[in-house]
């Protein structure tokens, strides 16, 4: 479900009208997330750390309203929920894209995510059959500790979907640190919104299930 955002009543009306005209309206940041507690928690409970932090990320994104904004034509819609479309590595070194439904409870998310990951790993398809706008594009690069990141994009496609990438976790002074890249459409949000998301993501990583 979604509802129309009334642009004329929006405090960011002028920002929207400016940035929606840009050839490259996305801006991005790279930050570090402390995974010390989350990694220990996931391992102690025998669950996938990838799915553990993916769940924390999508929960945080659903709680920040601007991460649920999408541009459709000349309008902006606010989706009730957004889901995760993440790359999934395959045994042959390639990857496929998944579509994982959002579930607020981790055990429910784990069930649907595990099924979807298994399906993608055992298929040859690259892109899920159904097209969705109420998603976040996720990717995982566990081989690389990056400090910057760019994305392949087709500028002929009107895209306003946030893109979040996770890098290689390393240990520093007893803490496990993971780089995270966040790219968002500037017509829909600013650095303030990204800051809210990062703070909430980190808070959730510091909590339990």
Image (tube, rainbow, N blue to C red):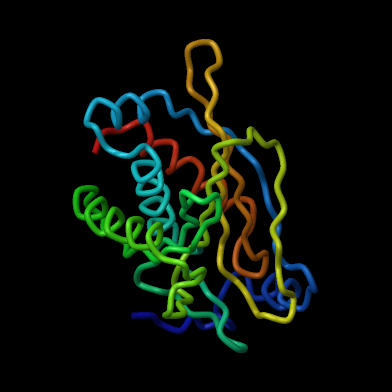
Please state the horizontal and vertical placement of residue 111, each as a whole percent of the image.
22, 54
Residue 22 location (% of width, % of height):
79, 73
Task: Name the residue nearer the viewer: 29 or 42.
Answer: 42
Viewport quadrant of the N terminus: bottom left
- The x, y position of residue 119, in whole percent, is 34, 62
* Lateral position of residue 141 relative to residue 44, left or right: right
Residue 10: quadrant of the picture: bottom right
Q: Residue at x 53, y 26 (%)?
A: 177
Q: Residue furthest right?
A: 23
Q: Is residue 207 left or right of residue 62?
A: left
> Which of 49/37 is in front?
49
Q: Quadrant of the C terminus?
A: top left
Within the image, what quadrant is residue 82 found in? bottom left
Q: Is residue 102 above or below residue 80?
A: above
Question: Percent x, y for residue 108?
Answer: 20, 55
Q: Residue at x 48, y 18 (%)?
A: 175
> Number of marks in the image?
0
Query: What residue do we see at 56% from left, 45% from top?
Result: 195
Q: Residue at x 44, y 75 (%)?
A: 78
**Which residue is outermost to the bottom?**
73
Q: Indicate whether 168 appears above or below 141.
A: above
Which residue of the protein is positioned furthest toward the top in this rendering? 173
């Amino acid at each position: 479900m979604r509802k129309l955002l009334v642009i004329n009543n929006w405090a960011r009306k002028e920002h929207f009208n400016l940035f929606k005209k840009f050839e490259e309206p996305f801006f991005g940041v790279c930050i570090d997330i402390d995974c010390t507690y989350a990694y220990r928690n996931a391992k102690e409970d025998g669950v996938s750390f990838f799915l553990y932090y993916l769940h924390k990320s999508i929960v945080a994104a659903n709680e920040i309203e601007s991460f649920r904004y999408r541009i459709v034509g000349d309008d902006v819609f606010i989706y009730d929920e957004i889901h995760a479309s993440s790359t999934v590595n395959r045994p042959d070194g390639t990857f496929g894209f998944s579509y994982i439904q959002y579930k607020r409870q981790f055990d429910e998310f784990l069930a649907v995510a595990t099924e979807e990951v298994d399906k993608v790993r055992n298929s040859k398809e690259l892109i899920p059959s159904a097209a969705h706008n109420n998603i976040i594009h996720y990717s995982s690069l566990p081989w690389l500790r990056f400090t910057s990141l760019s994305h392949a994009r087709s500028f002929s496609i009107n895209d306003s979907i946030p893109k979040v990438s996770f890098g290689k976790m390393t240990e520093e002074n007893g803490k496990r640190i993971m780089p995270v890249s966040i790219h968002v459409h500037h017509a829909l949000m600013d650095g303030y919104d990204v800051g809210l998301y990062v703070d909430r993501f980190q808070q959730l990583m510091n909590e339990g299930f």
